[in-house]
Amino acid sequence: MKLKPLFILYLFLIYGSIQAQQTKKNFSTFDNFFAKEDSFNRVKFYSGIGIGAVAYGTASYSLYNYWYKEQGFEKFHLFNDWGEWQNMDKMGHIYTAYNQSIVMYDLASWTGLHTNKSIVFGSLMGILLQSTIEIMDGFSPKWGFSIPDMAANFSGSLLFYLQQKYWGQQKIVLKETSWRKRYSTDPVYSLDGKYFTTLEGRADRLYGTSIAERYLKDYNVQTYWLSVNFESVLGIDDIPSWLNLA
């Protein structure tokens, strides 16, 4: 009878060992799925295409409902917004297209697609994702299709393309910082003195009140950086890999 607890403990240890091995096997399968392929993997490629198409459709539909639906649409037209916002919005286009190209390149590489094809795929997808917004703008009565915006989109994807094509890495990285700004609450009166507002109130109406809206719309608090990595540019291994000049 004294052996019974030991026997139960023995069975428990065996069961735990089996479960640990199975868990390890499951994690190994999980890791293998997300590991970058050395050669083209058809399953990963078409899985990525399917997931990407659903994500793109969902994002476009959400953007339409959130940003454009209430305004309605009119005939497609151009709009020259060069110089507005002191062109800070153009930096936003460059930054977004650049980083979208990197993400799309990484996804293509993950499927084992050839390096050159992955670079082209990433660059074109960065432009495509940004062009969706421009086309919607083109039908919007409030805005219009902006050629300067499209030029900025191409510039962002080109910054990625040239580095990845000729250096095989991103030695010069485009980064962005943004901090919430509190505007003055002092009254600003109309010329006739009958009405007043505040800079904070105007900012809320113009930029929104949520963190996401302020991050995207308030160009006054955005800073864009070209961050140069010393180790990769100079090719000196003794330089810390985290040391950059921005």
Image (tube, rainbow, N blue to C red):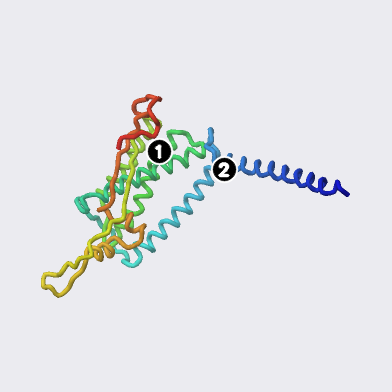
Q: Quadrant of the C terminus?
A: top left
**Residue closest to the far front:** 2
Picture quadrant where residue 145 is located: bottom left
Q: Position of residue 175 (x, y in %)?
A: 33, 43
Lower sequence index among marks 1 and 2: 2
Q: Is residue 25 above or below residue 74?
A: above
* Position of residue 194 in the picture relative to residue 139 (left or right): left
Q: Position of residue 189 (x, y in %)?
A: 15, 69
Picture quadrant where residue 42 is located: top right
> In front: 135, or 170?
170
Which residue is disc 1 drawn over? 120
Q: Is residue 207 above or below residue 43?
A: below
The span from disc 1 to disc 2 (Cα, nearest Å) is: 21 Å
> In front: 104, or 14?
14
Q: Position of residue 193 (x, y in %)?
A: 12, 73
Amino acid identity at mark 1 = Val
Q: Position of residue 233 (x, y in %)?
A: 34, 28
Picture quadrant where residue 143 is located: bottom left
Residue at the (27%, 52%) spot, across then down:
221
* Position of residue 18 in the picture relative to residue 159 (left or right): right
- At numbered mark 1, what does the secondary structure look like: helix, strand or loop? helix
Q: Which mark identifies residue 43? A: 2
Q: Residues within 10 Å of mark 1 (few under 14, many from 20)?
A: some
**Residue closest to the far right:** 1
Residue at the (82%, 49%) spot, across then down:
5
> In front: 46, or 11?
11
User: From this viewpoint, is residue 147 visible?
Assistant: no
**Residue closest to the far left:** 192
Q: Which mark identifies residue 2? A: none
Residue at the (57%, 42%) spot, across then down:
33
- At numbered mark 2, what does the secondary structure look like: helix, strand or loop? helix
